[in-house]
Amino acid sequence: MCSRIVSLGNPTRALSCWKDTIAVGLWHEDIIIINAITGSQTAVFSGHTDLVTSLVFSSDGTSLVSGSDDGTVKLWDVQTGGVVKTFSGHSNTVCSVSISADSTMIASGSDDNTIHLWDIQTGECYHVIEQWNTVDQVCFSPTDPQCLLSNSDYKIWQWDINGHQIPPTYDGLCVAFSPDGTQFVLTNGAVVTVQNSNSRAIVAEFHVANDPALQCCFSPDGRLVAVTAGHTVYIWDITGSDPHPVKTLIGHSSITSIVFTSPSSLISISDDSKVTFWQIGVPSTDPVKIDPESIPITSAPIRSITLQPKDGVAISSDLDGIVRIWGISTGICRTSFQTPAKDYYHRDVRLINGRLIFVWCADKIHIWDSEQGEVLQIAYHTGGEFDDPFNILYDLRMSGDGSKIFLLNEEFIQTLSRLTGEILGRVEIEQETSWQSLTVDGSRVWIHNYKSEYQGWDFGTQGSTPVQLPNVPPNRLHLSDTMLWDPSLSRIKNTVTGGVAYQLSGRFANPTAVQCDGCYMAAGYNSGEVLILDFNHLPLQ
């Protein structure tokens, strides 16, 4: 039975699991870390320059090893997400990686027809094993750090760490050790064989469908063997004198990797960009249809982000008009709404007393209420001399209580009543400066430009003249008096040294929408992804 599907928005290639932590390698260069219990994304590791082809955790779960199409092997610190070492020496794609049981060595197999053995301590390659063809797979014995298996040229080879081949060889496409190292499973076409590692005696043998079995693995207790063939995962119980099938899992497109997360649960990835969680103990073999609401990732570009830390949520709005509410601490999409707003860039959304209030601009200001599911249209009064003021509208924001709407034009800031559309206040701004966006805090509002220069006013009560505020933004980080969030460049700046304390980089370097307070930042991207950062846990310089 399928219990959950998580869509990552990109085809997946590599997979590894340690206890409740899942690592997934994408066709682009990132590694996504997922919590196996909640299915929520907890981290992104960026460092490769091409697709990630292979992943494996160390035996204690503190390290992750990755191979890539960029020809390198990387060792990652799982807690920080940082690269500990990069191992360079292959002349082509790294197809497979493995780490020894004592965490002293890494083996990597490559399209350059070699296996490289790396010393983790020094980062040096201390042995190269030549093969006749691409090395599709390498794996250390989980109990013997001196022994490893490889798959090349449709054969399974066994080696010691000095590069000496240990006979015999086997015909096969895939091989995997049992957790205790006493058995290994290999696939050869549609035939799956489980053998004793020492005596080579056959423990079990069974057949799958006509498609060749391409991936295989053991359950953590060594009781079950899972293999993939085409779109299907076959699971067999190999204990006792009568090995027998216990489950057939259907519902993927082409499967690229599988791994058990517990004796009764398995996850699979495929080129359909999804991670699927399966429960083995459920008797039904039919796939379960998943409510689309349980798939939290959207492919439409994000156009608005609202951060509401007091409510523990961040709210995203995409170009298709879909609004999603995300838990800040979990990263899980709590719920989503389809709104009538599509293609419009100037928008804001807030959760007010449990109701979602969504505002966007077209020829008028539109307000969508999630409780009523209705749109209230309010005529937009500029008080200016423009034929089409919306061509020069820079930003739109609601006040925290949702009572006011603030508009940033090239000539002025104006606030309206959300309920009546009445103009409550207006202030002229410097036209020669290219102001970028608004930051609203109650009746106070700040504008900033690309040079991180700020101006602020307090609009006070209705009918009063806005009062100029000190040019200090309300989203100054409270971690330190010296740390300042620079929204235009997506970085934290040290105001004493002038240096950059933290910088969004890689695929997260250019968010389409950002909001920040003293503790958190939420950012949205053209990919449809939402990134939430907790500044208290960032390694600020």
Image (cartoon, rainbow, N blue to C red):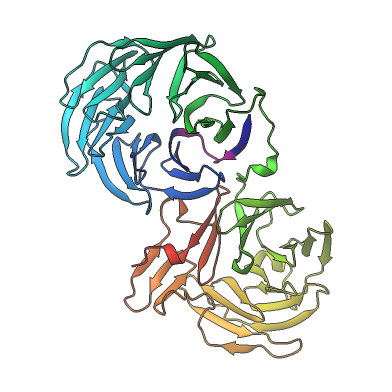
Residue 531 on the magenta segment: no
382 or 500: nearer the eye? 500
Rendered position, 30 above or below 313: above
Classify the position of the N terminus by image quarter: top right
- Horizontal side of 205 relative to 123 (left or right) equals right
Q: Position of residue 380 (x, y in %)?
A: 78, 70
Q: Where 246 sits versus 306, above or below?
A: above
408 or 230: which is nearer to us? 230
Residue at (78, 74) in percent of width and height: 381
* Residue 72 rendering spot, x and y as whole percentages: 29, 38
Place of residue 4 in the rendered image (x, y in percent of width and height, measured from the top left): 61, 37
Please state the extent of the stretch shown in magenta in the rendering: 6-13
Residue 76 visible in rendering: yes
Residue closest to the eye, 17 or 178: 178
**Residue at the front extreme?**
240
Residue 367 image point, x, y percent: 78, 63
Taking the spot 75% from the left edge, 75% from the top edge, the residue there is 403
The quadrant holding residue 357 is bottom right
For the C terminus, which image quadrant? bottom left
Q: Residue at x 67, y 85 (%)?
A: 459
Q: Is residue 191 visible?
A: no
Left-right relation of 138 to 217: left
Q: How many marks?
A: 0
Residue 168 figure quarter: top left
Residue 10 part of the magenta segment: yes
Comparing 301 with 26, the one in front is 26
Question: Which residue is pictured at 71% across the width and 69% down the height?
Answer: 389
